[in-house]
Amino acid sequence: GESVGLHLPTLSVQEGDNSIINCAYSNSASDYFIWYKQESGKGPQFIIDIRSNMDKRQGQRVTVLLNKTVKHLSLQIAATQPGDSAVYFCAESTLSGNQFYFGTGTSLTVIP
Amino acid sequence: DSGVTQTPKHLITATGQRVTLRCSPRSGDLSVYWYQQSLDQGLQFLIQYYNGEERAKGNILERFSAQQFPDLHSELNLSSLELGDSALYFCASSAGTGGTQYFGPGTRLLVL
């Protein structure tokens, strides 16, 4: 099946710094991508999504970048806070489809 | 709070037994998805229902089955349980057949 992988399994950043979490996907047909945040003991929480007709989308303190040429997705978190500590998953799918393929996750630790 | 509810929150049972996990989607959502998350794996898609009909199947074992009822709640049935079935089971819902999925808090299953 399709594979979605993360380059870094763990990431530690100082509070106030920017964080960048990367993700590679393999299915050229994927046209919809989502980042989820999962805190310990909780379900994944939607952060931001992007469609393949865009290469950048911004939310509150988060930006997702999509590079379809190299099938790469990244999540940038500005001014990282302790509450951002969690596991972050990227997921790929198609807008008309039904299966989401999740990466294995990157654990982000924010150092106060 | 995503609006997706799951019961029970925790479940402890023995090998060979059968359990039923329950999920209520967000109000208005027609799709329900089931995922398994174990310690050494990411989120594994199991199955999706849309408006009562099976829509997509992922890595779901034959010992597992699911259904979606007319009121759109869904149940995941796990039978002949094995130690390796111990995991977090998440339900997610979306408005249509695809698009953003909102996750419930999960059911933690422990098979002894």
Image (spheres, helix red, strand yellow):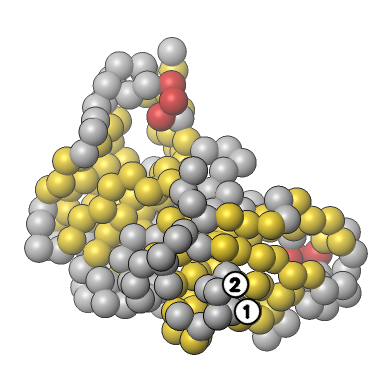
Graded by Cα atoms within 10 Å as few (under 14), some (14 to 19) or many (20 or more), the crowding at tag 1 reads: many
Decide which of A73, A57 is in the foreground and name it: A57
Chain identity of mark 1: B
Q: Residue at x 36, y 17 (%)?
A: A15
- Label 2 secondary element: strand
For the C terminus of chain B, give its image quadrant.
Answer: bottom right
Residue B66 circle label: 1
Decide which of B109, B8 is in the foreground and name it: B8
* Disc 1 to disc 2: CB gap under 8 Å: yes
Chain identity of mark 2: B
Q: Amino acid at mark 1?
A: Ala
Query: Mark 1 or 2 closer to N-term?
Result: 1
Would residue A2 be seen by someone viewing this image from the given angle?
no
Q: How far apart are the two marked residues, 1 and 2, measured between alpha carbons? A: 7 Å
Provide the residue designation for mark 2. B74
Q: Residue at x 50, y 69 (%)?
A: B33
Q: Residue at x 68, y 79 (%)?
A: B64
Image coordinates for residue B78, horizontal then vertical, percent: 74, 74
Question: Image height check: is B30 above or below B112?
Answer: below
